[in-house]
Image (cartoon, helix red, strand yellow):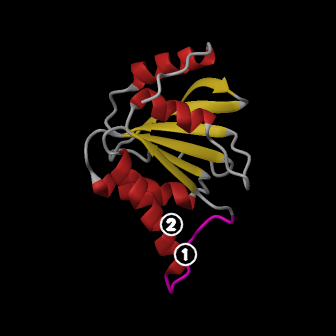
Amino acid sequence: MIYLNSILEKEIFYSQFSTERNWIKDFPKEKWAIIIVADEKNSNYFSEIINKCINRNVALITSVGKQYDSIHDLADEEIVFREVDIEKLYLPKHSIITIGEKNFENGIWEGIYMSLNEEVEIKKIVILDIERKFFEEIKKLIEKFKNGYLPESD
């Protein structure tokens, strides 16, 4: 994980998804949110990411990019499945909020500035780059946000 900056007293980190390493080992275990950035469809990876984040007490899951809707739906389905399954699967004590946005800038902005959960004070935000190609763009965008930039609304 790479520290990018702090906005609204929340530390913002960047990480890349990889099947070759334990990508989640440095992620927070409480008071955190994730922004999942994905343009390419890969439901197996999305399910793995969602499951591991839930198991680490994520408070907010934001999906960004062309696959935002798939990720958002998978997250909602997994949360509901865990709530109603006969076997008691792990869910945090707090509710998990899920939001999604196709537009890159708006999605990252919402994931940071709308990272609210009444039950948990979010202190850390991890931006997870599924395709490992958005680092420079995300880094520049975070700096622009820090300087007061607002993306255009759709």
User: Image point 71% across, 29% down: which residue?
Assistant: 8
Count neighbours of disc 1 (C-alpha within 10 A) and say few if under 14, some if 14 to 19, many if 20 or more.
some
Range drawn in magenta: 85-93
Q: Which mark is residue 83?
A: 1
- The spot of residue 26 in percent (x, y) is 55, 43
Image coords of residue 57 (percent x, y): 61, 57
As drawn, 74 above or below 17: below
Residue 50 lies, with reference to residue 12, above or below; the image says below
Disc 1 is placed on an element classified as helix
Q: Secondary structure at mark 2?
A: helix
- Asked if residue 56 lies in the magenta stretch, the reply is no
Quarter of the picture holding the C terminus: top left
Q: Which residue is mark 2?
A: 79
At x 54%, y 15%, the residue is 144
Q: Residue at coordinates 41% horizontally, 20% vertically from top-left? A: 137
Q: Amino acid at mark 2?
A: Ile
Name which quarter of the figure residue 68 lies in.
Answer: top left
In the picture, the disc for residue 99 is none
Q: Classify 10 Å Cα crowding around label 2: few (below 14), some (14-19), many (20 and above).
A: many
Could one spot residue 24 in this view of the protein? no
Q: Is residue 130 visible?
A: yes
**In the image: residue 52, left or right of residue 129:** right
Q: Of 150 and 8, which appears nearest the observer?
A: 150
